[in-house]
Image (cartoon, helix red, strand yellow):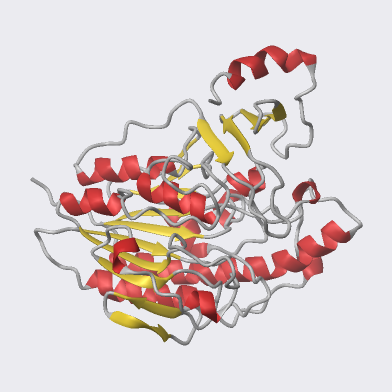
């Protein structure tokens, strides 16, 4: 029997699907991910089930969407009783490990989300999702000089350097030392970049001038939205380039036989439709990159309806020496609660997305948005009120739950 594969998940934050060189974005300098995509299945229609960090992270780790996984509100912790992919693979004999941003522990809403207090918060062992080895931080969005604690660091310690560099290097060192022939390893490397603050230093890279950024057509021109988008994207793409370099070194360290998944928990609007941040049901917020490299498998582009919740099923199949059954006809998307932070989506919503359609309902079940993605990928025309689509909307509405 051939040895079961080592499996690595690389999970970033706020990296939208379009913001990669291999996806055609001229702003994105991502040679490492471009090289990985040439060896991978590129799930080009992948979405996050929930375009906000805690909800998406809980769904990714458990394979269960919110609120059924226990995370209903932004400040909810993942229940200690929740069963994660680490529990499943640990039971199958895998050595499991987690590195970096956790984002699922009980947090005090009165503590600032950005800064050292949040970054130094200790995540107790029982709240670490069942991982055998854990080294990370709850949050804080310190893209430089992160504080880490965990299995070998009983108290939080500050590590100098760019967060993506520090976390990827420490993960690479630990994973490379796992050489047991009997026990393969499963590792999750979770990075905050390219999440704000976009103006933070990006491993010494000089950000391009805002006027040199190429904007999508659905960013309104000539006003505040354009100026803000250009300023933010200047730093955003610097963090993407810096994190791409760190990911490249990590992928090289684990070797070509390792099964590698690269994705993000959500995207960022960056001025599309005049909106910013996440929580919104638009493509810039819900669409995420998803590359899957399996040794010996041919690289290809897959246009199926895939969600981050499918990654757990994929991983269980690889661990069992089997193939994943493949994508379904549609992917569910939702925001189970309103996150009361600046610029975020103002309502609870739920919907579904196929490779050619997207329907979004309000909390009361009434249609809010309907887009023909095949002919309007920038979502510039909401077809909810168009009688020609009323029958299709009614049929899809029955599938939204």
Furthest toward the right, the residue is 222
| Residue shown at 12% from the left, 65% from the top | 180
| Residue shown at 61% from the left, 55% from the top | 19
| Residue shown at 71% from the left, 68% from the top | 234
Quarter containing the N terminus: top left
Left/right placement of residue 308 relative to residue 114 reads left
Left/right placement of residue 180 relative to residue 155 reads left
**Position of residue 313 measured from the top left corner of the image (x, y, whole percent):** 32, 40
Tell me if residue 169 comes above or below residue 293 in the rendering.
Answer: below
Left/right placement of residue 395 relative to residue 227 reads left
Q: Viewer-proximal residue, 139 or 26? A: 139
Tell me if residue 243 comes above or below residue 86 in the rendering.
Answer: below
The image shows a total of numbered marks equal to: 0
| Residue shown at 27% from the left, 47% from the top | 296
Tell me if residue 37 comes above or below residue 47 in the rendering.
Answer: below
**Position of residue 149 measured from the top left corner of the image (x, y, whole percent):** 36, 78
**Position of residue 230 measured from the top left corner of the image (x, y, whole percent):** 78, 64
**Position of residue 337 measured from the top left corner of the image (x, y, whole percent):** 60, 45
Left/right placement of residue 88 relative to residue 365 reads left
């Amino acid at each position: 029997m051939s040895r079961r594969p080592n499996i690595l998940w690389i999970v970033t934050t706020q990296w939208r699907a379009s913001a990669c060189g291999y996806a055609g974005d001229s702003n994105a300098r991502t040679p490492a991910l471009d090289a990985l995509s040439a060896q991978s299945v590129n799930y080009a229609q992948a979405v996050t089930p929930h375009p906000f960090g805690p909800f998406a992270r809980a769904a990714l780790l458990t394979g269960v969407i919110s609120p059924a996984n226990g995370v209903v509100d932004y400040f909810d912790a993942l229940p200690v009783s929740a069963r994660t992919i680490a529990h499943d693979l640990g039971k199958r004999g895998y050595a499991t490990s987690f590195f970096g941003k956790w984002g699922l522990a009980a947090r005090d809403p009165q503590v600032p989300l950005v800064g050292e207090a949040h970054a130094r918060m200790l995540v107790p062992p029982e709240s670490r999702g069942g991982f055998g080895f854990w080294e990370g931080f709850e949050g804080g969005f310190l893209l430089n000089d992160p504080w880490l604690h965990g299995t070998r660091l009983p108290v939080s310690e500050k590590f100098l350097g760019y967060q993506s560099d520090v976390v990827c290097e420490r993960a690479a060192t630990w994973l490379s030392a796992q050489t047991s022939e009997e026990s393969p390893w499963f590792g999750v490397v979770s990075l905050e970049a390219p999440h704000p603050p976009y103006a933070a230093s990006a491993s010494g890279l000089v950000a391009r001038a805002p006027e040199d950024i190429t904007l999508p057509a659905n960013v309104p021109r000539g006003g505040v939205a354009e100026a803000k988008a250009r300023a933010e994207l200047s730093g955003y793409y610097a963090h993407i380039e810096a994190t791409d370099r760190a990911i490249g070194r990590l992928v090289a360290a684990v070797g070509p036989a390792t099964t590698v998944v690269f994705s993000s928990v959500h995207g960022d609007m960056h001025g599309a439709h005049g909106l910013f941040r996440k929580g919104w049901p638009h493509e810039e917020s819900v669409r995420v990159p998803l590359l899957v490299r399996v040794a010996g498998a041919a690289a290809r582009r897959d246009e199926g309806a895939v969600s981050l919740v499918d990654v757990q099923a994929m991983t269980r199949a690889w661990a069992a020496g089997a193939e994943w059954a493949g994508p379904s006809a549609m992917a569910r998307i939702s925001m189970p609660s309103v996150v009361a932070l600046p610029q975020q989506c103002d309502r609870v919503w739920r919907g579904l997305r196929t490779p050619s359609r997207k329907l979004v309902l309000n909390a009361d079940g009434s249609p809010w948005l309907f887009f023909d993605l095949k002919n309007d990928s920038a979502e510039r025309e909401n077809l909810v009120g168009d009688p020609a689509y009323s029958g299709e909307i009614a049929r899809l509405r029955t599938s939204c739950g």
